[in-house]
Image (cartoon, helix red, strand yellow):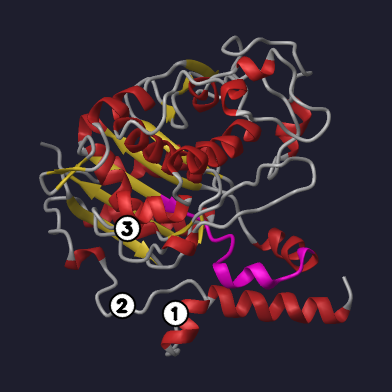
């Protein structure tokens, strides 16, 4: 790495990781992912939980800091237990976007805008050469939501593991095989906009963010990442930890917020049911991961998590900083050089963090 690039990386890291620790203008706050808000903490919106062990919560927070988390939120029975880190910083959601989109599909289905049995052939969906086969065009919207489309076309925002593990084309018929497939997820974004005639960001703001009082999300916080391999872009959300905590609480409350129905209850049950066995006892629903205990979670690259434990009425959000909207202007070279400075939080580390948090809950 040349000297100029080293300087750029150092400056970027300094600006990003220290942001919020100094007095900055409202414009600078917004450019770097913050929304100006004198009442940033969730404690102004939710009552504080009682009888949790402060000592054990401190141990959990220290562990979160040790493994590289940038913020953690814990809710219990609709009350705030723990809020640590830069919880109002709008960051890249990575694959948590899929669970956010799942909620939008639930609303669209309830509105009668989308029929899950519609096939890609019915919709006229195709892609760049090699184009979809007649067999692939028989995949339904439901198959895509389950990640069981049987379509293994190249896709935007694929990880190395996705590319390496992708089956050959036409080996499996739609519905036969589960494969965590960005093609399915990206096309679902396009189908949603086609059938509802509403942009993803605007729909999320009007249908979910505004009704549950999200404080930071804006309609233009859904971006579109295009790649030459496919006609369909990935659609990352930029969203804060505290807004994700509200989203998790919405699901814990089975889609109701302040006596108003936001997401259909039947959809929440359907989308968090394990239709497929993913690995190590983990299942997959409609763009949600499921656990044998009855818990379920959204999971994104580097350690973005929303964990919902219905039996205990607990929601846990973990974020790892991987960028803010203002970092879109950085070159790909600089972004690559930043990666070694980000410590990923894996599933096992998240399990340990959840265990530490649960040790702090009231014994009753």
**Residue denoted by label 2:** 37
**Residue denoted by label 3:** 58
Answer whether residue 331 is magenta in the image. Answer: yes
Estimate the spatial distance between the alpha carbons at disc 3 and disc 2, rounded to whole Å: 26 Å
Q: Decide: is 125 above or below 335.
A: above
Which residue sits at x=36%, y=66%? 216
Which residue sits at x=68%, y=18%? 136
Q: Residue furthest right?
A: 2
Q: In x, y percent, where is residue 131?
A: 78, 27
Highlighted range, magenta: 318-332
Badges 3 and 1: C-beta atoms under 8 Å apart? no
**Residue 196: which quarter of the image?**
top left
Q: Nearer the viewer, residue 138 or 85?
A: 138
Q: Decide: is 55 above or below 4.
A: above
Badges 2 and 1: C-beta atoms under 8 Å apart? no
How packed mark 3 is, by other alpha carbons closer than 10 Å (few <14, some 14-19, many 20 or more), is some
SS type, badge 2: loop
State which tag comes first along the sequence, 3 or 2.
2
Estimate the spatial distance between the alpha carbons at disc 3 and disc 1, rounded to whole Å: 22 Å
């Amino acid at each position: 790495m040349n000297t100029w690039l080293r300087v750029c990386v150092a400056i970027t890291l300094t600006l990003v990781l220290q942001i919020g620790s100094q007095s900055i203008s409202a414009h600078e706050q917004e450019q770097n992912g913050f929304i100006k808000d004198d009442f940033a903490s969730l404690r102004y919106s939710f009552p504080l939980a009682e009888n949790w062990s402060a000592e054990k919560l401190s141990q959990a927070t220290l562990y979160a800091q040790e493994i590289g988390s940038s913020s953690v939120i814990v809710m219990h029975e609709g009350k705030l237990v723990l809020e640590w880190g830069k919880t109002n910083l709008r960051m890249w959601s990575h694959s948590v976007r899929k669970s956010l989109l799942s909620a939008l599909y639930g609303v669209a289905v309830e509105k009668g805008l989308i029929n899950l049995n519609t096939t890609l052939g019915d919709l006229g969906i195709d892609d760049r050469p090699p184009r979809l086969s007649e067999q692939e065009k028989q995949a339904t919207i439901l198959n895509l939501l389950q990640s069981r489309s049987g379509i293994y076309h190249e896709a935007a925002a694929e990880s190395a593991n996705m590319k390496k593990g992708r089956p050959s084309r036409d080996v499996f018929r739609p519905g036969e095989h589960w494969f965590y497939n960005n093609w399915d997820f990206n096309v679902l974004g396009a189908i949603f906009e086609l059938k509802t005639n509403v942009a993803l960001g605007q729909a999320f703001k009007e249908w979910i963010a505004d009704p549950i009082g999200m404080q930071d999300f804006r309609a233009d916080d859904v971006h579109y990442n295009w790649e030459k391999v496919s006609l369909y872009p990935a659609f990352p959300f930029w969203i804060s930890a505290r807004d994700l905590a509200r989203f998790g609480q919405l699901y814990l409350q089975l889609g109701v917020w302040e006596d108003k129905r936001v997401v259909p209850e039947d959809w929440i049950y359907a989308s968090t049911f394990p239709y497929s066995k993913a690995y190590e006892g983990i299942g997959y629903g409609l763009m949600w991961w499921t656990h044998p205990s009855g818990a379920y979670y959204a999971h994104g690259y580097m350690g973005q998590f929303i964990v919902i434990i219905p039996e205990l009425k607990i929601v846990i959000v973990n974020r790892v900083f991987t960028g803010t909207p203002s970092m879109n202007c950085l070159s790909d070279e600089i972004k690559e050089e930043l990666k070694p400075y980000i410590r990923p939080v894996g599933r096992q580390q998240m399990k340990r963090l959840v265990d530490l948090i649960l040790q702090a809950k009231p014994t009753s």
